[in-house]
Amino acid sequence: MTKNVKPNKLANSIKPLKLSNSMYCALLVFQLLNLLTLVQQFHWLYLLFAILALALQFIVHFKTQGKITSLSKSNKIINDYPAVKILPSWLVLLLAISGSIGIAISGTRLGLLLSMIHLLCFAYSLKMFEVTSRKDLYQLVVLGIFVATSSLIFIQSIYFSLAVIVLIFSNFLILLNLFTPKMSLLAQSKLLAKLSFYAVPLAVILFVGFPKLSPLWQVPNVKSAKVGLSDSVKIGDIAQLALSDELAFRVSFEGNTPQHAQLYWRAMVLDDFDGVTWRQASRDLDQRRSDAATKQNALSSSTVELRGEGINYQVITEPSFQSWLFALDFATSEQSNIGQRSDFSLFYRSIISQTFSYQVTSYPQAILTAKLTKQVRALNLALTTDNNPRLLAKAQQLRTLYHDDRQLINQVLSEFNQQDYYYTLQPPSLTGNSLDQFYFDTRAGFCEHYASTFTYLMRAAGIPARMVVGYLGGEINSQGNYLSVYQRSAHAWTEVWLPESGWQRVDPTAAVDPERVESGFSSNLMQEYADLSSGLFSTQSLRAMQWYKQLKMHIDAIDYQWTRWVIGYTGEKQSRVLEQLIAGFTKAKNIFYLLLGLGGIILLINWYKATHVKVKNQHEIKQVYLNTLQLMASHGLVKERAMTGQQFTKFIAITRPELLENFAVISDYFEQFFYQNIDNDLSKQVLNNDVKKLKYHYRRLRCQLWLAKLTPTKEN
Amino acid sequence: MLAKQKINGYRSIKTLVKLALQKRFNAWLIRRIPRDSQQQINHRNIFIMPTRFGTSFVLFIFLLFLLGTNYQNNIILLISYLLVSFFIVVLHHSFFNLSGLRFQATSSLQGFVDSQLYFPIVVTSDKTRFNVGFYFESLPAMANSQGSELKRSDKPNKITIDHVAQGDNNIRVPYRVSQRGHYSLGRVVIISEYGFGLFKTWTRLDFAQKITAYPQPIAYAWSDSVQDTNGEEEKKSSESYQDSFQAGQDEFHQLQHYQLGEPFSRVAWKQVARGQGWLTKQYQQTLSGKLQLDFTYLPAGTLEQRLSWLSYAIKDCSNKQIAFSLKLPNQMIEYENSAQHTLKCLAALARY
């Protein structure tokens, strides 16, 4: 890194690079833009440094521009000047060393990836001080492109990506300007846009067809705060999460989308309750992980009895920086980087640090674990604390009343339904996280209150039960035919184990607020949600508008396609797409048609080029001439049919000599062009220029005629 | 000592191989791009190679590809593919920047050794082209004698036209005369790095024109000793020249239209400022007299030295309008006083 920063000794022997002021400004502006792409990742110290460095250079260059312009009044030719030495080389070197040390020290806090990026950007900032030769300029441009590209490690949304791609190509303007200093900025941009556009087809072919390699070596991961559900749930956590409007994941089903009430997206099972917090049983977590990794398939065949038809779907999750995956029960996935725990939840074998897509098949009617091992049974009956004595008593009372597990469950649920339990995003706070207080006194809570209490009751009554967290439902995007699940759909429910039928999903929320399960948030809940989530200015009114909803849906659909086909274009997907393509091509007919079509297009283009350009220009020249005649006629100078063009010119020369200059140009050119045929090898560009010239004369003629018409009336 | 000999031996082998390769290459080049005073360049005679920057740019793209692969980041991969295809598009674009240019050069050159001459070429283009550089390929003999330093220092005799306009352009390519004689001018290298500096597009055209390089005029102190001037050959001082002739002052002769490549110092700025267009000042010298120049009567010196003295004398006589005759061992040119006569005498010196 520091090599870039060191003063270039070779540069002394070569004459210094001279650039125009606009070029320096372009360099600075592009540096600013390139750094802006990463602005969210920067440490504030570097940010400060970069801003200071840029500001300093901007000021110096504005000053020199002032000097140059005052100089160039006397001598117009000298406009370029070598880079001003703003900082002495030793200071730059000192800055480089101290900065690198600073980054190295804060490296542990920043993480490897971020400190590398800081180092890169730091070199980029300093490099700007040392633009003494063309080589430095090249390095600067390449560094800029690298900086802009590395921002894509962090953000990959369609608009950001497209903006970065445009920015990367705009960086080439600097190089283009180096070689065509006299071209206007507009022409340069047009040329660059044209060339970049030409680059697209091949890039698309490469993207679709070039083999996707698996990572060649381990790279430092993006470190970020965990997003979404966490692996320990306290009362109130999910209600908090439900205020987030962020996207969690998106799903597209191969067949019909199941009912809303069926869309229980399982993320993880929490079976360890200490009276306050639900956790995953950590005792054998590691062992289970490794178990799951090796015996994934064995596990599912021995404890799961697959029934009914499978539902195929693809899930694309947003980066959560955790490893849970979301799927409907009972989910199987054949992807090698996905594992399955013994509680049937899927997990990714690493941290999901960028958008990740996976294919799942679910069997909703499967019977899970018809026979429970003693160990698991004990785990799911464990009640480690006694801080909810009233619930315990209630459970024992129920047990004496109902011997059948199902009847007991139904009784609890009907109590939830019939008594005045209230489903709300703003539950009253509970002292000491007491479930007793909720169940018997406040009776208002969010899903985790109900799920937690229900699970507790079940365990107390001797029915193995566990808490499951995940998401419920999702919003169907009709534009793209997919389901978006947002963080606000976070949900908690219970699984109870019943003999013979295995683990069964029971959602106490459904008993309290059926609408939540059937179709999502009820209007009451939506109102609460809006009240809670609106900040300084409310988007509530905007949200309600139909066009806004439509627009949002469109934008989201575009983003989804981008995520699915570009970000989520994995090696497996690639081989599938290529297979389809090849299958399509192998039909000989298709190839024949394709070649025929291509040949036809090429022929058409050639023919068009060969004939049309000339015809068009001929036509235009004729048109200009006819327009001129019409114009003359409208001012009383009519060309008789019998007159030849030359005669008319002479006539004009006699009657209105002041018009002759412009008229003669047009009529002479017209005659030369149509009657002398000396123009056969005039190129398209020459013709175009000629047409422009003729039009110019036409305009001048018109102007003259108008003026002539105006002046006599004044005299009169 | 042995090591030194070894190195010398190695060097001689290297130069031999180099020369042999060059010979073959030149033969191939003559077949590929034949000599002609009028040439059009196209795919047959344009060479295109990535520059050092271009090569490192490809490496950079590969780096991006690795980054994208390791992070399994399709957007970064997409960018690396976009840049690769952009690279290929630029390759074509920089080719088309030169392709189709037509060149015409019909005049041969005359001049003294070590003087700066300008070789006029008419460049005809059907569209605007950018950043086209012209320079004379340095002859192998010259490159050897002057060392590689000159070659590296960014081609001092290169003229670069930023903007070649549509139509005819008159371009004067600087030529530094290095050797006395009458020989072929060699190839003009026409080069462009217009392709974003990623590509070097060039061609080497031989316009089948010759140069008559007169010996470098060196003043000889006729009255002083030979040693004095021997040491300072390059000093073209006329002060020590024979007393009877006064040092001629350059006199303004006429204004001519400025042509691309002429030095700015000769531009008539006054006229430019008045808006009379770009003109250059042409100078001429005047005087009169009569003299006989005889090769055999010259003081002792090497052949080249003697020819140089003669050359100076001829030049001086011509400037001062003195009629003179030239006698070389193999030929005799009679008294006369005209521009043609001067050129004839100088040509005789050049060919001797």
Image (cartoon, grey):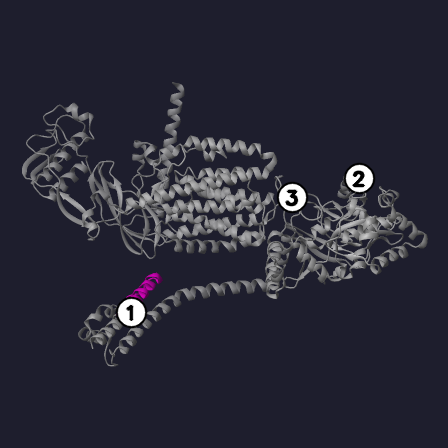
Residue A255 appears in view: no
Q: What is the spatial separation of the Cα atoms under label 3 and label 1, in whole angstroms?
A: 69 Å
Q: With respect to residue B172, does A542 lie above or below? A: below
For the C terminus of chain B, give its image quadrant. Answer: top left
Badge 2 amino acid: Asp
**Res A616 quadrant in image:** bottom left
Badge 3 amino acid: Ala
Task: Give the chain letter at badge 2.
Answer: A
A621, A69: nearer the viewer:
A69
Density class for disc 1 (Cα within 10 Å; few <14, some 14-19, many ≥20) is many
The residue tagged 1 is: A698
Q: Secondary structure at mark 2?
A: loop
Q: Secondary structure at mark 1?
A: helix
Residue B258, horizontal then vertical, whole percent: 22, 49
Residue A225's disc number: 3
Q: Are marks 3 and 1 on the same chain?
A: yes
Residue A256 appears left or right of B40? right
Q: What is the spatial separation of the Cα atoms under label 2 and label 1, in whole angstroms?
A: 91 Å
Q: Which residue is at a point 51% across and 63% down the rendered structure image? A: A598
